[in-house]
Image (cartoon, helix red, strand yellow):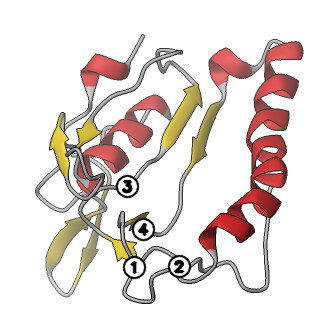
């Protein structure tokens, strides 16, 4: 499911905009999980929900939140991921990941693992060099796996 808003980048009026958008986002997140569970397919289907950035706890404009590459949220459901688990935390301001930090390479390695792919072997040759999605990085986050 995909939810799209013409002006989705909440740099201003975040209180007003999130109050309007959260019901749609809740439904968009819950509906496929509920449907997969009802059909008995959730255990074999990985659901990934995320965005382009995290958000800072403050804004330069004062009524929104700015992009934050230091702390962001992604949720994974089904597909061999432990349910009801929150993994990692930001500092008390919500600015920077400080506990169980996960790099994008770790996230990709974990997603690929749940799809049955060894990220260290998923390579393609270009310009005489082997490349892979996780480059030379990435560890599967074993603490979140069933």
Q: Residues within 10 Å of mark 2 (few under 14, many from 20)?
A: some
Q: Earlier in the sequence, mark 1 or mark 3?
A: 1
The label shown at residue 53 is 4
Residue 94's spot in the image, x, y percent?
30, 52
The label shown at residue 59 is 1
Closest to the observer, 122 or 59: 59
Q: Are marks 1 and 2 in contact (CB under 8 Å)?
A: yes
Q: Earlier in the sequence, mark 4 or mark 1?
A: 4
Residue 128's spot in the image, x, y percent?
14, 82
Badge 2 is on which residue?
Answer: 63
Per the image, label 4 sits on a secondary structure element best described as loop
The label shown at residue 141 is none
Q: Are marks 4 and 3 in contact (CB under 8 Å)?
A: yes
C-alpha gap between disc 4 and disc 1: 14 Å
C-alpha gap between disc 1 and disc 2: 7 Å
Closest to the observer, 51 or 129: 51
Q: Are marks 4 and 1 in contact (CB under 8 Å)?
A: no
C-alpha gap between disc 4 and disc 3: 6 Å
Q: Is residue 86 above or below residue 9?
A: above
């Amino acid at each position: 499911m995909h939810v799209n808003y013409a002006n989705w980048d909440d740099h201003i009026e975040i209180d007003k905009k999130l109050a309007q958008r959260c019901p749609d986002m809740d439904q968009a997140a819950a509906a496929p999980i509920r449907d997969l569970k009802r059909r008995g397919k959730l255990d074999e289907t990985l659901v990934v929900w995320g965005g382009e950035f995290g958000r800072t706890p403050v804004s330069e404009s004062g009524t929104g939140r700015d992009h934050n590459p230091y702390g962001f949220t992604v949720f994974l459901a089904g597909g061999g991921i432990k349910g009801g688990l929150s993994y990692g935390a930001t500092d008390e301001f919500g600015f920077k990941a400080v506990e169980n930090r996960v790099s994008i390479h770790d996230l990709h390695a974990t997603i690929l693992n749940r799809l049955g792919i060894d990220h260290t072997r998923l390579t393609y040759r270009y310009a005489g060099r082997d490349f892979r999605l996780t480059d030379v990085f990435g560890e599967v986050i074993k603490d979140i796996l069933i």
